[in-house]
Image (cartoon, rainbow, N blue to C red):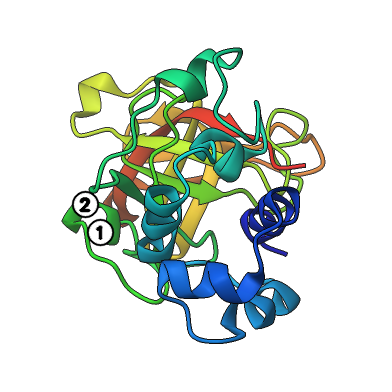
């Protein structure tokens, strides 16, 4: 279920704002918010932008991550110093089960039904896209449901061997620790129940290093 929608509902309840009033203020059709909340659907970046503009006391950090204060407060340095403008900087969120070559969406800045545009999480290092981890092969460092912030590696000389990377391969997206094997890349899980495997370098379209994560509870 989309935790952002649950936080929006929590905010509306706290402020005593009727759902119908909220829907009109952010350009939603009548009863659409309730339906999205019930289905656990995602919310588009255009609606998130409208929400943050129309409700400036709502902390974007809390809305996206659940961390900090719901209401922007002088006691919350991150939220208090964050300025909301009419243009919200976003990054693509790539589905983990996306088809091969899907990270091109992030490189090209393309938005599609399979690639949400999510407001930048300011507490993380600079990143190019995010992706939701799936499965337990990288447990305990990464848990299923973690939102991983990733930065593209454009030069092979900058690859940090032994660290966790996202690989966009001919077989789809892979999250592993990587090691150089001349013509291939060795992929290693943190969970020892999963064996190592190699991917030919020619089968790798894009490579990105994991620079941070948000753990959604």
What crowding class fits label 2: few (fewer than 14 Cα within 10 Å), some (14-19), or many (20 or more)? few
Residue at figure coordinates x 57%, y 32% from the top left: 213
Would residue 117 be found to the left or right of residue 96 on screen? left
- Residue 121 in the image: state x and y as whole percent: 45, 35
Quarter where residue 113 is shown: bottom left
What residue sits right under mark 2 in the picture?
Answer: 107
Task: Locate the N terminus and report the quarter of the image it occupies.
Answer: bottom right
Q: In this view, does 212 lie to the left or right of 216?
A: left
Q: Determine contact: label 2, label 1, CB under 8 Å.
A: yes
Where's residue 116, x and y in %?
Answer: 41, 63
**Left or right: 165, with 15 as reference point:** left
Q: Distance between the residues labelled 2 and 1?
A: 5 Å
- Where is the C terminus found, in terms of image quarters? top right
Secondary element at tag 2: helix
Q: Residue at x 40, y 18 (%)?
A: 81
Residue 162 is at least partly visible in this image:
no
Circle 1 residue: 104
Residue 95 picture location, percent across and down: 50, 62
Q: Give the camera-side residue of 60 and 136.
A: 60
Judge whether 11 appears above or below 188 on screen: below
Instruction: Please name whichever residue, 20 or 35, is drawn nearer the observer in this view of the structure.
Output: 20
Q: Residue 77, image x and y in percent? A: 51, 13
Residue lying furthest right = 193
**Closer-to-camera residue (85/15):** 15
Q: What element carries label 1?
A: helix
Q: Is residue 127 above or below residue 28?
A: above
């Amino acid at each position: 279920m989309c935790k952002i929608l649950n936080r929006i509902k929590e905010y509306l309840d706290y402020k005593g704002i009727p759902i119908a009033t909220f829907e009109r203020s952010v350009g939603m059709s009548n009863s659409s918010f309730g339906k999205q909340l019930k289905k656990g659907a995602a919310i588009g970046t255009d609606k998130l932008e409208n929400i943050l503009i129309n409700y400036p006391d709502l902390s974007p950090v809390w809305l996206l991550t659940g961390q900090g204060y719901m209401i922007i407060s002088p006691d919350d340095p991150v939220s208090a110093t964050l300025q909301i403008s009419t243009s919200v900087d976003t990054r693509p969120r790539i589905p983990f089960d996306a088809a091969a070559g899907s990270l091109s969406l992030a490189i090209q800045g393309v938005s599609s039904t399979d690639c949400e545009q999510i407001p930048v999480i300011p507490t993380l290092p600079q990143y190019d896209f995010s992706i939701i981890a799936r499965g337990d092969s990288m447990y305990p460092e990464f848990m299923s449901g973690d939102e991983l912030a990733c930065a593209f590696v454009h030069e092979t000389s900058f690859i940090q061997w032994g660290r966790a990377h996202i690989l966009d391969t001919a077989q789809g997206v892979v999250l592993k620790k990587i090691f150089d094997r001349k013509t291939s890349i060795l992929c290693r899980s943190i969970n020892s129940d999963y064996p190592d495997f190699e991917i030919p370098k020619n089968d790798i379209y894009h490579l990105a290093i994991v620079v941070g994560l948000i753990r959604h509870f």
